[in-house]
Amino acid sequence: MKDVREFVLKTPPGGVKSYDHDALCDLLEVDDRSRVIFEQGVGREAIVRIYPANPLMNMREIRVDDLMMDARGFITIGSYYDGSPLRFRLFDPKTGNAQRGAVFGTTGAGKSRLVQAILIACKQSGIVVHLADLKSGQSVPEAAGHVATRVTTQFETILMLRGLVAEAERRMKEYAELGRSGFVIGAPDPLMYGIVDEANRLLEKGAPFRDEAARLIKELGRTGRSVGVGIIIAAQAGHLDELGGSDTLRAMLKEGEVILLRWSSAMMQQLVGDGLIPRGEALQPIPKVVGRVQRIRRYNETATEDDDDVNSQGMLYHLTGARPTSMARTFVVGSVAPCTGYDPVILDLYGDGQPPGNQIHLAAYITDKELDAFAAGGDGPGTAAQRAAKEPEPTSMTTSDRILAVLTADGMSEPDLLAALNKDGGREVKRGTLRTTVSTLRSEGKIARPDGTGCVIPT
């Protein structure tokens, strides 16, 4: 690349385990710290490059073709500072394993946009997703109607995880009877993921279902992967205490796909101490504001209006990838500015088709004790969620289920059906989506063939 200066440094045996990035920039006389990129090389070498501007500042928009899983089970979610593709693995065809993943980062670092990219990739690649959005559904609202199951409370998440573990156990028994030791996509089961966003809310100290959540996630990571049932969590903190206090859970995540977005110094110390990052590993800091030059302001001199605007969302390290110490960034996922409703760019990436798979019937996984508490009308943890499990909200239902829920016994015209769907509180349904879904329901025998009047008739 033109105007890029590169230095190859000889390092001590074992490579560089720590370095002072500010001191390096001072030595090179570069005020903008983000222009200097340090990377540990092969053997006893390290590379330092000085760019005219941070090479990760201007990323293109993500495309659907980036998110189509390739033959090796990878999707492309961004690029490294040198332009090399940043890939995230969803499936390993050599071992037949689903993956275990973790995304860590501070608030505003870009976790939710990365989760959106993974969700879109799963839908476009035919992967069944059961999603828990524990920020009351606000982290990834566009996912409504584009995943098989969507829950927004901790109790519902426990029911969802119980269902995923039950599915993994069913597959294990059936595969054992068939003599199968590995998973093959679509033979006969689809690849499936449980994804928990804001998982720290479920796993932090004091959370009502913390112990069971840690156990279920650990079980999925330990046994689900070999039968095509994977687990991915996204969390704001990386300390052991924030992930259920389980050493086994942390060890499981270290062997999967681990991504670290912008972090705090305390988080870095915790991740190193808990073994997610090798002790003393040299990672260049990801600043909140890229390109800002630290300098003393003169008397009466004021900062520019955008001096403190965050612009490093999506910058990350893929800690379990081939280049764990190389800075990378995701492509732009969705609109740059906040939207007053669903983000149209993200909705376009999801597309209009139905999501793969069937919704988990949450009520089937409520225990007798929990049912007794529900019957007694108690106000204990999860009571409201138990009602939701029995009567799913439209925001967590597929378009097919919403059609069957609003369809009257004597049938409805297409305009009336469309109007009813768009008044039920769920995501807006377009006419083309309605017609496609109605056609699918007819082929499945769930609604009758038209009677010549254009009316949609239930069976």
Image (cartoon, rainbow, N blue to C red):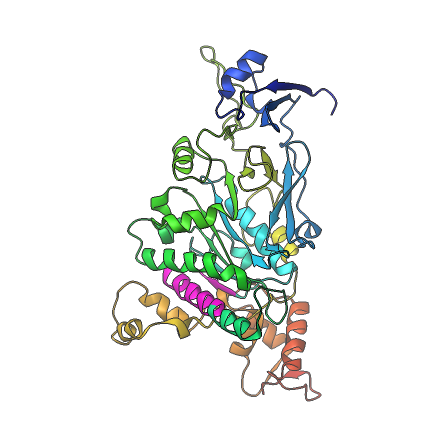
Give the image location of residue 384, x and y in percent.
34, 66
State the residue in front, 178 or 108: 178
> Compared with residue 173, is residue 109 higher up or lower down, i.e. above or below?
above
Q: Residue at x 47, y 10 (%)?
A: 298
Which region shows up in magenta? 149-168
The image quadrant where one finds the N terminus is top right
Magenta stretch: dominant SS? helix
Residue 51 position in % (x across, y down): 65, 22
Q: How many marks?
A: 0
Is residue 150 inside the magenta stretch? yes
Splitting the image into 4 quarters, where does residue 417 fall?
bottom right
Instruction: Give 305 or 354, whichever is nearer the viewer.
Output: 354
Given the current orientation, which residue lies at the most extreme right position? 2
**Residue at image location 46% in from the left, 48% down from the top:** 253
The x, y position of residue 244, in whole percent, is 35, 51
Residue 397: give x, y in percent of width and height: 51, 68
Quadrant placement of the C terminus: bottom right
Q: Is residue 43 above or below residue 177?
A: above
41 w.r.t. 259: above or below:
above
In this view, the residue in front, 334 or 122, is: 122
Does the rendering let one see residue 144? no
Which residue: 50% across, 31% down? 288
Instruction: Look at the image and tell me whether residue 361 can be seen.
Output: yes
Q: Is residue 405 magenta?
A: no
Foreground: 275 or 148? Answer: 275
